[in-house]
Amino acid sequence: MADRLCLQGILYVLYNDIAWQLLPLELGFGSGQTCWRRLERWQQAGVFDHLHRILLAELNAAGQLDWSRACVDGSHVRAKKGVPTPVRRRSTDARRAANTI
């Protein structure tokens, strides 16, 4: 199955919000299972992340992005919660230090 047809099938399923097995064969995109496997393979290979970066770079170069409306989503960037807690240190002195409990 050609990559272009699989991509069209993937977009059709995602746009119409249907189950993969409901992709109509008569559209010529191949089976839903084939499209799903190709999507999975491309996702694991980082194809969509790469395309996303290229698209952002081209739109930015053309002045088509409004970065004042950008936000960071914690599902993609690790969010630090609170202040780091100090680590308890073991005393090297034979007697117990006042600051270790």
Image (cartoon, grey):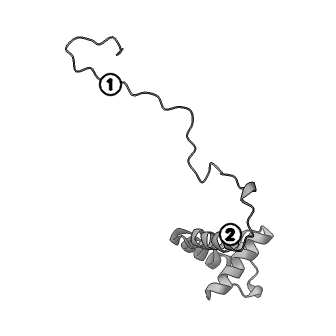
Earlier-in-chain disc, 2 versus 1? 2
The answer to whether 72 is drawn above or below residue 33 in the figure is above
Eye-nearest disc, 2 or 1 = 2
Q: Is residue 26 visible?
A: yes
Camera-nearest residue between 77 and 58: 58
Where is 73 relative to 45, above or below? above
**Which residue is located at x 63 percent, y 69 percent?**
52
- The part of the image, by quadrant, that contains residue 51 is bottom right
Q: Nearer the viewer, residue 31 or 82?
A: 82
Q: Position of residue 29 (x, y in %)?
A: 70, 84
Determine the secondary structure under disc 2. helix
Per the image, the residue denoted by label 2 is: 60
**Residue in the foreground of this view, choosing between 22 and 43:** 43
Q: In the rendering, which numbered label is found on residue 89?
A: 1
User: Residue at image x 75%, y 62%?
Assistant: 66
Q: Residue at x 61, y 73 (%)?
A: 54
Q: Secondary structure at mark 1?
A: loop
Q: Judge from the rendering whether residue 98 lies leftward or rightward of residue 23; answer left or right.
A: left
Q: Amino acid at mark 1?
A: Arg
Tell me if 86 is positioned left or right of 56 in this view. Answer: left
> x and y percent of residue 56 in the render?
66, 69
Q: Position of residue 16 (x, y in %)?
A: 80, 71
The image shows residue 35 at horizontal and vertical percentages of 64, 77
> In this image, 24 relative to 38: left or right?
right
Residue at the extreme left of the image, as rendered: 94
Please identify the quadrant where the C terminus is shown.
top left
